Amino acid sequence: MELTNDKNEVVQEAAKILQELLRRLDVKASVIPSTEMPAESSEDAEPTVTLDIEGEDLGILIGWHGQTLSALQHLLRIMLDTKTQEKLPVVVDVNGYKRRHYEAIRALAWRMAEQVRVKGTPFSLEPMSAFERRVVHLALADHPDVITESTGLGETRKVCILPKRSVS
């Protein structure tokens, strides 16, 4: 799906705002905008704008378990929303960190689903953020032998992978 001219302007504005934030933080890096399908959505979904920050020694922008990166993305969304009228999903990444993290969560979900299938016993993953839980649920949504459900509250919320019970 292609972006309209208005949305292309929003992408450029988002990149400009993020570059200014980095400048004010005294971080030397480049912002590379791209539009791509969100890895966790269907083909008919609206494209997501990904702003990948590239450079060296950018761990400070990721923070502990990606918390700083999430805060930076949230801040950018707020600033972009106040400057434009266009609502467009924006993802901020640092040297592909989020993409690698997403793929690692999907791989973990499939490994644990296989374990649940073989042993026939449920398995609870460690507590995860809402985004991470969504990745697990979507990764296993079409799995023939397991189902997923979230349990717990707040920061202790996690995904349980359960064997599907055959209906007789």
Image (spheres, rainbow, N blue to C red):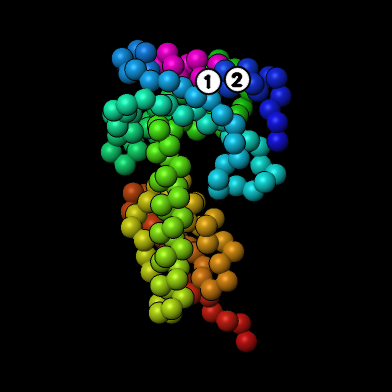
Secondary element at tag 2: helix
In the displayed structure, does residue 43 sit left or right of residue 113? Answer: right
In the displayed structure, does residue 51 sit left or right of residue 122? Answer: right
Q: Position of residue 154 (x, y in %)?
A: 36, 49
Write down the quadrant of residue 12 in the picture. top right
Q: Position of residue 15 (x, y in %)?
A: 51, 19
Residue 38 visible? yes
Q: Is residue 15 above or below residue 138?
A: above
Q: Are marks 2 and 1 in contact (CB under 8 Å)?
A: yes
- For disc 1, the marked residue is 14
Q: Is residue 127 above or below residue 66?
A: below
Q: Is residue 45 magenta?
A: no
Residue interval drawn in magenta: 13-21
Query: Which kind of residue does numbered mark 2 sit on?
Result: Val
Disc number for residue 10: 2
Q: Main secondary structure of the magenta part?
A: helix
